Amino acid sequence: MTWWEGVVLFPINYIPGGAVAMLLLTGEYEHVVDDKNRVLVSNKLRSQIDADEHGSSFYLVFGANGILCLYPEKYFEQIALAVAPGATAPDEAVAFERISFALASKVELDGQGRLLLNDRLRRRAGLKDQVTLVGVRDHIELWNSKDWERYLSDNMAQYQKQMSQARQLVLQRQNEEV
């Protein structure tokens, strides 16, 4: 298990009555990293994030499996404050905290919605010029476009199986409520 997997996120936005307002980022968007190391974060993705509710800044983070992740600030703060997942010793918790903060950068999008990529994080993630931004529930992942296509190809059968099972579970629960 990688050190990001298993991090428990605590709800940050409560709605009266106990419900939780969740962020649900979706979609895939192909872009080019320009000669100044900037990439456009599509308006379709940005419009899914309420600045008042989720924060107006972002954190660019080296995440699980070496993928660069862009978290709205309030969501990343939850992760940063979480106890190291699976840490069985104090030195593991220290390592998690040290790496979590060292490999994260607070960033803001410019007026045109572009993100300036940190050279070091971009190099560590192996990002080239053709990137695909992917909405993944509470964050945006930045993938090399070819790597994203390969990932989809490698995982599509498992996804289809899980989607079918999830749909069946929802239908079963709906039938039980009737």
Image (cartoon, rainbow, N blue to C red):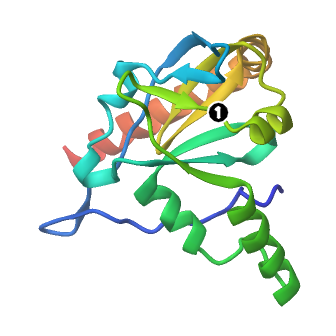
Residue 171 position by quadrant: top left
For label 1, the residue is 117
Instruction: Examine the rendered structure and indicate whether residue 112 appears above or below residue 146.
Output: below
Residue 44 located left or right of residue 108: left
Q: Which one is in front, 38 or 98?
A: 38
Q: Is residue 89 visible?
A: no
- The answer to whether any part of residue 136 appears in the image is yes
Image coordinates of residue 12 in percent, x first then y, are 35, 65
At x 67%, y 14%, the residue is 35
24 displayed left or right of 34: left
Given the current orientation, which residue lies at the most extreme front position?
36
Of the pair 18 and 138, the residue shown nearer to us: 138
Q: Horizontally, is 88 left or right of 82 in the view? A: right
Compare residues 110 and 93 and report the one nearer the observer: 110
* Pick the front one: 112 or 41: 112
Residue occupying image coordinates x 74% and y 62%:
102
Circle count: 1
Q: Amino acid at mark 1?
A: Leu
List x then y, in percent, for residue 108.
45, 42
